[in-house]
Image (spheres, rainbow, N blue to C red):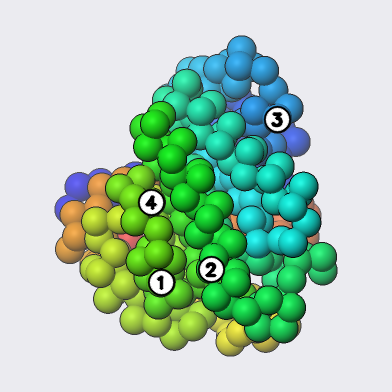
Amino acid sequence: MSERKWAYLASVGLGDMPVRRVAAELAAIGYRGIELTLAHFNPAAMDPAALEHAAQDVAAEGLAISELVVQQDWVTRDETQRRARIDLTKDCLRACADCGIPAINVFAGPAPWDPAAPKLGVDITEDEAYTMAGAAMEEVLAVAEDVGVDVALEAVFGMVARDYYTTAELLRRVPSERFRINMDPSHFQLYRNDVPMAVRNLADRIVHVHLKDVIGVPPTCGDTFLFPLLGEGLVDWPAFFAALDEIGYDGFCSVEFESFKYFSTVLAGDGLAAARLSMEQLRRLEG
């Protein structure tokens, strides 16, 4: 097994910090990659020169950009909003191609935390949601194929693609070589999927990995389930890492810190403290 490539999602507590400082701090902690969000790399708010400068700032600190988290909810009946979200996703693909970022992270929708989003199985059927997400995905993938950037779908609780089986259905409906997977074991584990089996079955699709634990059962984050610190949830980390090794995965494994109550009550909103704590956990999980 080669040395694992750890990255960190620069979101919780880090979005308002200059990207070069974030990259420098993460590099000092021991991370080799940074996963950017629209807070630091956004073609809707930054011109091409600023986007290039952001990418150069990261490179100057010795880190790679593992992917860009875009995650626009395409399952909405507000057609103006839907069109804007699809167009932003396509603009992100073009900007990533220009700046050497290999993949964007997307989800299928609808977002269960958004009160304005249609509720799956109540306001919208699964087939309608698949059709809406699939049509958007086809449009986005046409650009991805043209510019050579992967579109990595992340299964997310409560959405139409929320676990292994519902993700497989979207993959079946939208065939494309650029349709890839951001493997986050927490959502698969939440629905009691066999996570190592999912890794093996999706082997040729996985281009990015999120590291996040989970405890509880659906449907409500913060009530019936939550994302605790790495190692105190239900994810079998030795089995997960062994499955990644089995398929020969050598890409980035990026921490997605979503222990929100711990973050506010114990870490006092310090995003760098969360990154340092996560690195300690990773080293222990790896033995």
Check residue 44 in the rendering and tell me which mark sits there, or answer none: 3
Q: Amino acid at mark 4?
A: Phe
Pick the residue in front: 195 or 87.
87
* Image spot of residue 40 (x, y percent): 65, 32
Report, in whole angstroms, how far the alpha carbon at label 3 lies from the one at label 4.
23 Å
Element type where label 4 sits in the image: strand
* Image spot of residue 272 (x, y percent): 64, 44
CB under 8 Å between discs 1 and 2: yes
Residue found farthest to the right: 115
Q: Earlier in the sequence, mark 2 or mark 4?
A: 2
Pick the residue in front: 96 or 144.
144
Q: Earlier in the sequence, mark 1 or mark 3?
A: 3
- 114 relative to 208 in the view: left or right: right
Check residue 200 in the rendering and tell me which mark sits there, or answer none: none
Report, in whole angstroms, how far the alpha carbon at label 1 lies from the one at label 2.
9 Å
Q: Disc 4 designates what residue?
A: 179
Q: Disc 2 designates what residue?
A: 130
* Image spot of residue 195 (x, y percent): 35, 75
Q: Disc 1 designates what residue?
A: 169
| Residue appearing at x 54%, y 26% in the figure | 95
Element type where label 1 sits in the image: helix
Report, in whole angstroms, how far the alpha carbon at label 2 lies from the one at label 3.
27 Å
Q: Earlier in the sequence, mark 2 or mark 3?
A: 3
Q: Amino acid at mark 1?
A: Glu
| Residue appearing at x 37%, y 37% in the figure | 145
